[in-house]
Image (tube, grey):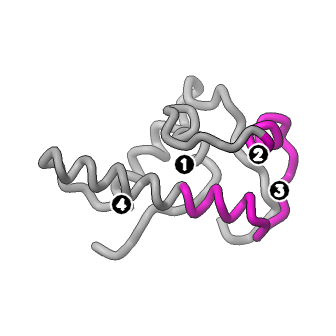
């Protein structure tokens, strides 16, 4: 289980963006804000997913340095549950038609 990372779905990038952890390039941010569907597997969609995984890993490392050892999937679970609250949905999530979420 130590090797399991975050799940790069659509809600985690949304909450990480809301928190200022993920900052999209202006063009990508505009597409996401306008709810433009990104092509599955495109550079933009993969970048969002990969950045989400890396952001969770950096959060995990920072928490570990503070003496709070959580697994990446546990952080994922906490963030995903937080993302269900309306206040974290002010910015839209990215759209991509794919079977991989």
Mark seen at residue 84: none
Q: Position of residue 34 (x, y in %)?
A: 85, 36
Find out whether the residues at labels 1 and 3 contact each other: C-beta distance under 8 Å: no
Alpha carbons under labels 2 and 1: distance apart: 16 Å
Alpha carbons under labels 4 and 3: distance apart: 26 Å
Can you tell which quarter of the image residue 39 is in? bottom right
Q: Residue at x 55, y 37 (%)?
A: 84
Q: Residues within 10 Å of mark 1 (few under 14, many from 20)?
A: many
Q: Is residue 78 magenta?
A: no
Ranked by sequence position, the earlier of labels 4 and 3 is 3
Tag 4 secondary structure: helix
Can you tell which quarter of the image residue 3 is in? bottom left
Tag 3 secondary structure: strand
Q: Position of residue 26 (x, y in %)?
A: 74, 38
Front tag of 1 and 3: 3
Ranked by sequence position, the earlier of labels 2 and 4 is 2
Mark seen at residue 12: 1
Alpha carbons under labels 1 and 3: distance apart: 17 Å
Q: Position of residue 94 (x, y in %)?
A: 73, 47
Q: Residues within 10 Å of mark 3 (few under 14, many from 20)?
A: some
Q: Position of residue 83 (x, y in %)?
A: 53, 38
């Amino acid at each position: 289980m130590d090797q399991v990372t975050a799940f790069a779905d659509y809600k985690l990038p949304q909450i990480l963006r809301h928190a200022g952890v993920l900052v999209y390039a202006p063009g990508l941010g505009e597409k996401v804000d306008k709810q433009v569907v990104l092509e599955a597997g495109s550079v933009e969609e993969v970048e969002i997913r990969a950045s989400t995984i890396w952001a969770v890993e950096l959060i995990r490392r920072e928490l570990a340095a503070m003496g709070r050892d959580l697994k990446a999937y546990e952080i994922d679970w906490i963030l995903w549950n937080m993302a269900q609250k309306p206040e974290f949905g002010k910015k839209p999530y990215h759209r991509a038609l794919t079977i991989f979420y």
